[in-house]
Image: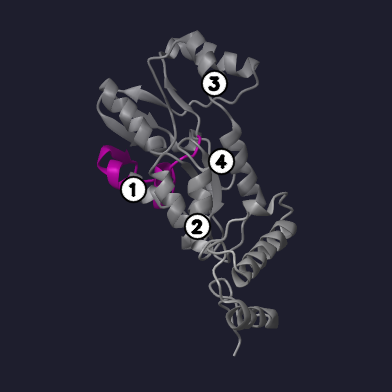
C-alpha cells in the first residue's frame, strides 16, 4: 500500500513518537500545572521541552509564545481570526484546503478582503499572477482621487467586492442613468483573462452574478467566461468615475502628467442598469 493522506494524518509515525507516548503513559501520567508533586513537575518539564523544540525550529525567541492546538484546523482558525480584521487584505491560492478557505470566506463576510489567485487544472500556480495581485492591492486610490477632485466628477466609486458590474449598477441606479461598458476597453490584472478562459473563478463571482444578473445586459458577442470575469470581486480595485465629456481631456492629461494609468471604458446613456457591449 502507498499512503498519500499525510496532509490529513501523517503515517507511519517516527518510532520516537510511540516511544514518547508509552513513556508518558507508563512512567509519568500526571497533568502539568495541576499539582507540585514529582510526576506533575515532570509532566510540565516534558511539555516545556516540546515548546523549546518548536521555538528553536521556528526561530522563536520565547518558548512560552508557542501555542499548542488540538489539530491544524484549530490552529489555522486561531491564527486567522487572531491576526485578521476588517479592511485587511489576504492573497491565497485556489488550491487551499477547506481548513484554510472556509475561515477566510467567513472572515470575508466580516470585512476582510480576499484575493484568490487561481491555479491551473494541473494545480500549478503562476508566480506572475501572485505578483500582479499583490501589486494591484498595494496601489492606493488616494492620488487618483485627488486628481479627479481637481476636475470634478458627477459620480465616483471604488471597485471592490461587488465587482465592476455591481458597483457600476449601484452608481447608475442612484443616478437614474444607464452605464455602457465596452469590454475591449476594460483593463484586467495580468493572468485574469487566462484564468477566465480556464473557468477558474472565486466563489464570490456566483454571488455577484445572482445579485445583479437581472440588471445587466450583455451583447450576444460577449462570451460567457468574460461575463463571469466582470462579476468577479476585486480585493482592491481602481476607481470608476463619471464626468462630463468636456472634462475628459483635462482628466486624462492630469493622469498622464503624473504617470498614472487611466482608461476610458464606456459612457453614460439614458435608461437604467448596465450594458456591456
Q: Earlier in the sequence, mark 3 or mark 4?
A: 3
Q: Which numbered disc, 1 or 2, marks the residue closer to the eye?
A: 2
Q: Which residues are magenta?
A: 209-236
Left or right of 114, for residue 270 = left
Residue 154 to residue 196: above or below: above
Disc 3 secondary structure class: helix
Q: Which numbered disc, 4 or 2, marks the residue closer to the eye?
A: 2
Q: Which numbered disc, 4 or 1, marks the residue closer to the eye?
A: 1
Q: Position of residue 223 (x, y in %)?
A: 41, 50
Q: Residues within 10 Å of mark 4 (few under 14, many from 20)?
A: few
Q: Residues within 10 Å of mark 3 (few under 14, many from 20)?
A: few
Q: Which residue is mark 2?
A: 100
Residue 265 inside the magenta-drawn segment: no
What numbered label is drawn on residue 135?
none
Residue 227 inside the magenta-drawn segment: yes
Q: Earlier in the sequence, mark 4 or mark 2?
A: 2
Q: Which residue is mark 1?
A: 207
Q: Position of residue 202 (x, y in %)?
A: 45, 51
What numbered label is drawn on residue 142?
3
Answer whether residue 269 is visible to the viewer in this image.
Answer: yes
Q: Earlier in the sequence, mark 4 or mark 1?
A: 4
Answer whether residue 276 is visible to the viewer in this image.
Answer: no
Quote the CA–CA distance across marks 4 and 2: 24 Å
- Residue visible at 43% across and 34% down in the picture: 182
Amino acid at each position: 500500500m502507498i499512503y498519500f493522506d499525510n496532509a490529513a494524518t501523517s503515517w507511519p509515525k517516527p518510532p520516537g513518537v510511540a516511544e514518547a507516548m508509552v513513556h508518558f503513559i507508563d512512567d509519568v501520567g500526571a497533568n502539568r500545572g495541576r499539582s507540585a508533586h514529582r510526576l506533575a513537575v515532570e509532566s510540565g518539564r516534558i511539555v516545556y521541552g516540546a515548546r523549546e523544540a518548536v521555538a528553536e525550529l521556528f526561530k522563536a525567541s520565547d518558548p512560552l509564545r508557542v501555542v499548542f492546538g488540538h489539530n491544524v484546523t484549530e490552529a489555522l482558525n486561531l491564527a486567522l481570526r487572531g491576526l485578521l480584521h476588517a479592511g485587511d487584505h489576504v492573497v491565497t491560492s485556489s488550491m487551499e484546503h477547506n481548513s484554510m478557505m472556509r475561515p477566510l470566506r467567513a472572515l470575508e463576510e466580516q470585512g476582510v478582503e480576499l484575493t484568490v489567485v487561481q491555479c491551473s487544472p494541473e494545480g500549478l500556480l503562476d508566480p506572475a499572477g501572485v505578483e500582479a495581485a499583490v501589486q494591484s492591492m498595494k496601489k492606493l486610490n488616494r492620488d487618483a482621487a485627488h486628481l479627479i477632485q481637481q476636475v470634478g466628477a458627477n459620480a465616483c466609486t471604488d471597485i471592490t467586492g461587488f465587482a465592476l458590474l455591481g458597483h457600476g449598477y449601484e452608481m447608475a441606479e442612484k443616478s437614474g442613468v444607464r452605464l455602457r461598458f465596452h469590454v475591449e476597453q476594460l483593463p484586467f490584472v495580468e493572468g485574469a483573462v487566462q484564468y477566465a478562459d480556464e473557468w477558474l473563478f472565486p466563489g464570490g463571482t456566483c454571488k455577484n452574478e445572482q445579485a445583479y444578473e437581472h440588471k445587466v445586459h450583455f451583447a450576444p458577442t460577449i462570451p460567457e467566461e468574460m461575463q463571469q470575469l466582470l462579476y468577479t470581486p476585486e480585493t482592491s480595485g481602481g476607481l470608476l468615475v463619471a464626468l462630463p465629456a468636456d472634462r475628459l481631456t483635462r482628466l486624462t492629461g492630469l493622469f498622464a502628467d503624473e504617470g498614472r494609468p487611466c482608461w476610458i471604458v464606456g459612457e453614460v446613456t439614458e435608461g437604467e442598469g448596465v450594458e456591456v457591449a
